[in-house]
Image (spheres, rainbow, N blue to C red):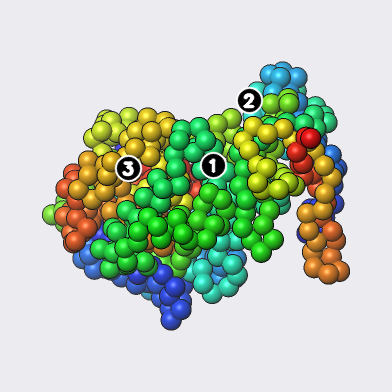
Amino acid sequence: MVPRSWRKIRYRYDLRGSYCENCGNYHYPPRNFCPTCRRKGKLIETLFPEEGKVVSYTVVREKEPYVVALIELDNGARVLSQLSCDPDELKIGMRVKKAFRRYGEDGEDGIIHYGTKFVPVD
Amino acid sequence: MRRVAVVGVGQSKFGELWDKGFRDIVLEAGREALEDADLEGKEIEAIFVGNMSGGRYLGQEHIAALIADYAGLAEFGIPATRVEAADASGGLAVRQAYMAVASGMHDIVIAAGAEKVTDVGDPMEILSASVDIEWERFVGGNLPALYAIIARLHMETFGTTEEDLALVSVKNHKNGALNPKAQFRREIRVEDVLNSPYIAEPLKLLDCASVSDGAAAVILASEDVARKITDTPVFIEACTQASDYLALQSRKDILTMKSVVKAAREAYRIADVEPKDIQVAEVHDSFTIAEILAYEDLGFAEKGRGAELIREGVTEIGGKIPVNPSGGLKACGHAVGATGVRQIVELTLQLRGEAGKRQVDAERGLALNIGGTGATAVVSILRR
């Protein structure tokens, strides 16, 4: 899985998506093709705002429970991400911001996967 | 386009079939369908197999050829094709078979669906490959988590409760208890669901269908041929399919499965019926929230009011629109690629009046098979 991770590093480390200059829509993750305008679209890659609000969430009850949330950024794009916070604090509509975090690793000697998680805006 | 009828159905038991292999269960279903139709294998002109992940569940690809071989049909060189759309693979196989007959290319074809999930690997993890692996699964968004996110928002927006979701599971278990081929054949109470452990909040163990082994098969024939073979043809009035964005984050509204709305609308138009004309339905309750969404997206209830149907008993056997009289995915077990075909088997038995203790009174039925979180939807309308 290393080549796939390596290709994605740019996108995992920053909140990077695409903006269509033709229709004004933002897309996350970045696309090569605007789903609204298709060939008439003009996509550029851009950094997205780092804050947004929680649309909905779940606590996945695995051995180490974690929170997965659908987040709407301030430009209207939606991002699925883990949320680092106390599950008791969770609320639909809560404000959150981007943070750089560890996601996991491929075994003891494998590469470590980093990426974007969100944390509550205090 | 020619009219197409179901002339034979068969199904293996669903569950943890440790003592049987993939080829055994497919043949069991296929043989039953042939006997039901009173046909010889060599009369079949083409085979379509719905299978999500032979490669990961069994380490076996080239599934369709394997089945043709072990069904004794390689001898005749009968073409066999595997189709895949995650857990909508079965519905898709039925649709491919339907198109093959409707178009006039073939007169008699078989659509099978099969999955053997208990041999290798983690069944739910492999089923979760139906979501966007790089952008949903990477951050921990497996299938239960994504349906949980939908459920949480449905509850917040429309006042649906965890008890409402539990009622879906209770109803489907009650029906499944009447189905000899279901995996879970015992009734449960609302408290059992509410006290079962959370998988992904608010969804609990008993809100989730188990990923199971199983196979199902249906034989389709053109109207002319069907009338010669059987006195009880069940006609496929429509069989439609639609797509949506793969990942939830790309959808503007995660409380509506646009693929289901589109496929259903088109099916109603082709069959020239309205939602109120549907008298029985088999829908894709991989998670209890999915059945509530199905009520709404199929037009049985307004958006946001799906839970009312389960509270008021409208979808029970004996209610106005019985949904999942088979026990659904929840009680039958979700044999992934087999599920969409099993739904057609159930509707056919119901419309023929051969459904035993779970029989409902219906002339027309609808099946909804979904891939993943709704990026694929297949809707069929059947009439006796």
Task: Identify the image quadrant of residue A110.
Answer: bottom right
**Circle 2 chain:** A
Residue B152: numbered disc = 1
- Do pointers 3 and 2 mark residues of a single chain? no
Residue A36: numbered disc = 2
Secondary structure of the residue carrying numbered label 2: loop
Name the side, left or right, on which B219 lies relative to B24: left
Task: Identify the image quadrant of residue B251.
Answer: top right
**Residue B293: image location, x then y, percent:** 43, 40
Query: Residue sitting at 43 percent across and 75 percent down?
Result: B17
Query: Residue sitting at 79 percent across and 35 percent down?
Result: A122
Please state which amino acid type lies under the numbered disc 3.
Arg
Please state which amino acid type lies under the numbered disc 2.
Thr
- Report crowding for label 2: few under 14, some 14 to 19, many 20 or more residues within 10 A (C-alpha): few
- Residue annotated with mark 3: B311
**Residue B54: image location, x then y, percent:** 54, 65
Name the side, left or right, on which B263 lies relative to B375: left
**Cα distance in 3D space between marks 1 and 2:** 28 Å
- Do pointers 1 and 2 mark residues of a single chain? no
- Camera-near label (3 vs 2) is 3
Whether label 1 touches label 2, CB < 8 Å: no
- Report crowding for label 3: few under 14, some 14 to 19, many 20 or more residues within 10 A (C-alpha): some
**Circle 3 chain:** B
**Cα distance in 3D space between marks 3 and 1:** 18 Å
Please state which amino acid type lies under the numbered disc 1.
Arg
**Circle 1 chain:** B
Secondary structure of the residue carrying numbered label 1: helix
Query: Residue sitting at 29 percent across and 64 percent down?
Result: B177
The answer to which of marks 3 and 1 sits earlier in the sequence is 1
Secondary structure of the residue carrying numbered label 3: helix
Residue B330: numbered disc = none
**Residue B338: image location, x then y, percent:** 42, 60
